[in-house]
Amino acid sequence: MISVKQQLLQPFSLSLALLSFAFLQGCEDKQATAPQGPQYDIGYVTVATKSVELRDEMPGRTVASYEAEVRPQVGGIILQQLFEEGTMVTKGQPLYQIDPAPFQLSLDQARSDLNKATANLATARNRADRYRRLVREKAVSRQDYDDAVATFQEAQSNVASAKASVENAKINLNYTKVNAPINGRAGRSSVTAGALVTANQSAPLVTVQTYNPMHVDLTASSTELLQFRRELAQGTFKRSDAELSDIQLSLEDGTTYDQPGTILFSDINIDETTGSFVLRVSFPNPQQILLPGMFVRASIPRGVVDKAILIPAKALTRTPKGDAQVSVIGQDSKVEVKTVQTDRLVNNQWLITKGLNVGDKVIVDGLQFVRSGAPVSKSHEISSTTTNNPSK
């Protein structure tokens, strides 16, 4: 028999069961009618090949094309400085005047010795000629004739020596004017009027440098040289001799120098301490914008890749290990992650050497909304012109 308590609880239990059923039914209805997540528009680029010119960036320093340290070739007192510091001078232009008085005296003495030697030569010649006739007539001995001929020959030698002394004295007198050895700009003078200088002293009086053209010594590693030669031999890219005359220069303030340069030569030796070598480039410098010692960067054509694959830089991601990856839209509209190999950045685009094929759809915009294996329901293609513009 049902107790009175059970009879009272039955209606309450029935009501609770009905309420639970209604609540569960409402939840199912809500789940069935819940809206789907937002659909994001994914932007992609279609992989295609094209010809791309590769360029290498190399640091360097400017060097004067000609540099001459002017030193005196005779000693004496500087009487006058004949140029203005920092101005252009021409080859042969007098720069300093050394006191010429001692050298003028030496020249006068040499000329006097030459006159004396010339007079002795005339006497010796006449005596030799006279003894030649007398020895035939046996009026003098053969020994006397031989002595006369020897005296004549010695007189000839003395004249030649005296002439050489005169020329040497002239040269030394001319050296009292210290002339510019090359065309160029004169630097700061290390001496003033009244200074005592010596022949071939270690300290130069002034340095003259030629700024047009200006040379640039670029530094590259031997590893880069080996890689370049290997890739060129393998046909990775091709180049022509005309490219050696299209060197672009960036100055210290980031501006581009408006004159192209030409490669002159590369050093034949590798520096043992740094493992690098020097490449010298010549640049026209008519406005003298380039000055010796400036730090610059040169852009040198490496070669042309005929079938290059470029993708926007923002389409590439890297794993914690540093592997490069890109996300592509597969034929079934699902996201696939591909590991690729890169070479370098070219105009804000990665040059891909392995991992992508022509026609692949590489995701550029909306990477944060996709994951590997997820379907892509909405996408649009981005033109290469837009991806090349960093402002867009």
Image (tube, rainbow, N blue to C red):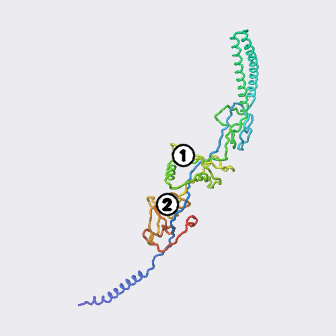
Secondary structure beneath dot 2 equals strand
Circle 1 crowding by C-alpha within 10 Å: few under 14, some 14–19, many from 20: some
For the point 55% across and 57% down, the residue is 304
Whether 367 is drawn above or below 242: the answer is below
For the point 62% across and 48% down, the residue is 282
Residue 266 point in image, percent of width and height: 56, 46
In this view, the residue in front, 283 or 253, is 283
Q: Pointer 2 and pointer 1: residues touching (CB < 8 Å)? A: no
The amino acid type, in three-letter code, at marker 1 is Phe
Q: Distance from label 2 to label 1 (Cα)? A: 29 Å
Residue 178 point in image, percent of width and height: 71, 35
Whether 134 is drawn above or below 373: the answer is above
Whether 353 is drawn above or below 148: the answer is below
As drawn, is 392 to the left or to the right of 324?
Answer: right
Secondary structure beneath dot 1 equals strand
The residue to which callout 2 is attached is: 352
The residue at the far left in this view is: 1
The amino acid type, in three-letter code, at marker 2 is Ile
Residue 52 point in image, percent of width and height: 55, 59
| Picture quarter with the C terminus | bottom right
The residue at the far front in this view is: 137
Residue 6 point in image, percent of width and height: 28, 88
Residue 277: mark in rendering: 1
Residue 379: mark in rendering: none
Specify the quadrant of the image occupied by residue 76. top right
The tag earlier along the polypeptide, 2 or 1, is 1
